[in-house]
Amino acid sequence: MIIDLDISHKQDLVFLRSQPLEVVNEFCKIALEFIKKGSNKKLYIAASQKLQVSPDKIESVINAISYLFTECSRFMLNENDFNDSISSLKYEDELTESLRNYYLEYRKDIRNVLQEFYPQFDHYSNLEWRLDVQIANRSLSDTVNPIYLLKLLTKNGGSSALKEQILQTDPNNLKHLCNELESALLEIRSYENRIIMRNIK
């Protein structure tokens, strides 16, 4: 899998070709700080004065490097996929190696930062069930009314405490739910989904 950079990001990243490796390394450090802590205008102004370019240009280059690092970290691209993602920029080997080394060294940290922005959903922990069958009542002597009682235990990713939900359903709805879950499992085992899941783990 490779990251498809849009035209504006490519134009900003091409700027690195004309810069010495020390400047590129400094840009990578600033981009990593941007990902962790946000924008720092003072750094952009200082870099623009040193390189004699506008602060807006410095900011756009930092944004492009940050986008490259975050997207590659999000999909946990390996070394070869990272190289392929920036191959269209036609960097020198040293420049490619420098960007790749920063990405490989900090991708787990970047991924941890990204996970802070993802919503925390409850996860399955356990399921207990009981089948209740009403076989008759005062008005109807031959009725059969089966009901499933379900106790679903879930836990949140950020907590070890269990949350309990009591559910009630009839066999038809339960069968429909099982069919839908089986369809979802078949879909996730498809070749296309296996490729996607392998890249986001």
Image: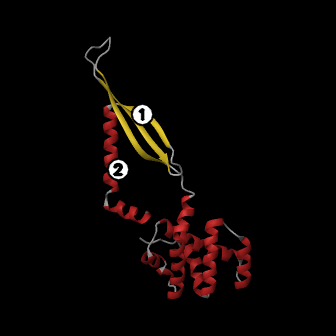
The quadrant in which residue 129 appears is top left
Q: Residues within 10 Å of mark 1 (few under 14, many from 20)?
A: few
Figure check: 137 above or below 59? above
- 45, 113: nearer the viewer: 113
Q: Is residue 12 shown left or right of residue 180?
A: right
Q: Amino acid at mark 1?
A: Leu
Instruction: Look at mark 2 in the image and give the residue it sits on.
Output: 184
The quadrant in which residue 136 appears is top left
* Residue 92 in view in this figure: no
- Please name the residue shown 33% across and 51% down the image: 185
The tag on residue 167 is: 1
Measured in 3D between alpha carbons, the distance from the residue under mark 1 to the one under mark 2, in whole angstroms, is 21 Å
- Please name the residue shown 33% across and 36% down the image: 174
Q: Amino acid at mark 2?
A: Ala
Figure check: 61 above or below 200? below
- Please name the residue shown 31% across and 58% down the image: 190
Q: Position of residue 197 (x, y in %)?
A: 39, 61
